[in-house]
Image: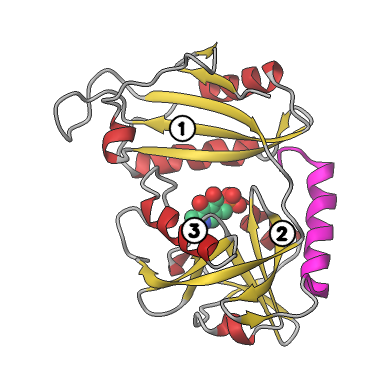
């Protein structure tokens, strides 16, 4: 099935939807985005995603997005293309800027795309990234379209038959994945790095903290080799166990704590589409 596209205020044909080659999001990565889970024609946790979109946009110095308008875009693509399971991708950029690196004055570009997606398996392999996530950088904590570092790390993971790459930060502490947050079980206790580690304030992470409970703890990156269980959270993975980190195997993944976290998450998410 073709994706459904909403661009700058209206639904459009996916084959002819066009964004300028001078769009600042394309030329210099001056944009922000959200990926939202779509199930049975409904968007999960849309209010939290829209709020984070606004936080990322203003953090990057873009004008505050009109969230009612973006929500309308989401509703229109969901109505046009009511997939059983998919992803909404919201992109909001600095707009057209023909001559250089300053933002243009024509106003931002707003795109909402809805595509079908496959569900992820309960457990997967990950690798660690040999360079550091900067926990004090200007873009830290913002979900911007400047994701080149994540794209490189994920490509390395794929080369090693893994589906995610996990970063340490500049002081060697566990941080996050290219598109996920990470949780570890130590002595039966669930831990996740704090936001000060430089990780994104993941919406799934926040829901697992609220619904399942975990300690926010600074942990060294090599905790991944010692942990009883490791799992990742994200919009596209929900709660996904890890059965291999680099060459190290975690037998029996998803383990009991991960399985319980997944069970609670699925149950609570089914009861409330916009928690
Ligand atoms: N960390 C990064 C860098 C991400 O890009 C994402 C999601 O895309 C996450 C964590 C997980 O966030 P969420 O649970 O909101 O999908």
- The residues colored magenta run 254-275
CA distance separating discs 3 and 2: 19 Å
Q: Are marks 1 and 2 in contact (CB under 8 Å)?
A: no
User: Which residue does the numbered mark 1 point to in the structure image?
Assistant: 91
Q: Earlier in the sequence, mark 3 or mark 2?
A: 3
- Measuring from the top left, give residue 108's x and y in whole percent: 35, 24
- Disc 3 Cβ-to-ligand 1 distance below 8 Å: no
CA distance separating discs 1 and 2: 25 Å
Is residue 201 visible in the rendered image? The answer is no
CA distance separating discs 1 and 3: 21 Å
Is residue 91 visible in the rendered image? The answer is yes
Q: Give the answer, above or below, for where 38 lies relative to 70.
A: below
Mark carried by residue 48? none
Nearer to us in this view, 200 or 83: 83
Q: Quadrant of residue 132?
A: bottom left
Residue drawn at x 17%, y 33% as measured from the top left: 102
User: Which residue does the numbered mark 2 point to in the structure image?
Assistant: 239
């Amino acid at each position: 099935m073709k994706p459904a596209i909403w661009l700058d205020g209206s639904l459009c044909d996916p084959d002819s939807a066009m964004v300028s080659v001078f769009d600042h999001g394309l030329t210099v990565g001056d944009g922000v985005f959200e990926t939202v889970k779509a199930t049975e024609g409904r968007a999960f946790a849309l209010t939290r995603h829209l709020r984070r979109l606004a936080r990322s946009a203003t953090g990057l110095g873009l004008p505050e997005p009109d969230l009612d308008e973006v929500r309308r875009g989401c509703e229109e693509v969901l109505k046009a293309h009511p997939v059983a399971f998919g992803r909404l991708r919201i992109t909001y950029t600095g707009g057209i800027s023909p001559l250089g690196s300053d933002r243009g004055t024509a106003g931002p570009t707003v795109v909402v795309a809805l595509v079908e997606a496959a569900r992820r398996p309960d457990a997967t392999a990950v690798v660690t990234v040999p360079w550091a996530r900067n926990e004090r950088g200007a873009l830290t904590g913002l979900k911007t379209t400047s994701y080149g570092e994540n794209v490189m790390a994920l490509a390395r993971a794929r080369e090693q038959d893994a589906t995610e790459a996990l970063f340490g930060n500049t002081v060697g502490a566990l941080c996050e994945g290219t598109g996920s947050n990470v949780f570890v079980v130590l002595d039966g206790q669930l831990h996740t790095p704090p936001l000060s580690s430089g990780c994104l304030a993941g919406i799934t992470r926040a829901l697992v903290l609220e619904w399942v409970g975990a300690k926010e703890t600074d942990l060294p990156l090599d905790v991944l080799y010692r942990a009883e269980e490791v799992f990742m959270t994200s919009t596209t993975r929900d709660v996904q166990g890890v059965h291999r980190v680099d060459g190290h195997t975690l037998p029996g993944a998803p383990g009991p704590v991960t399985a319980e976290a997944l069970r609670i998450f699925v149950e609570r998410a089914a009861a409330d589409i916009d928690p």
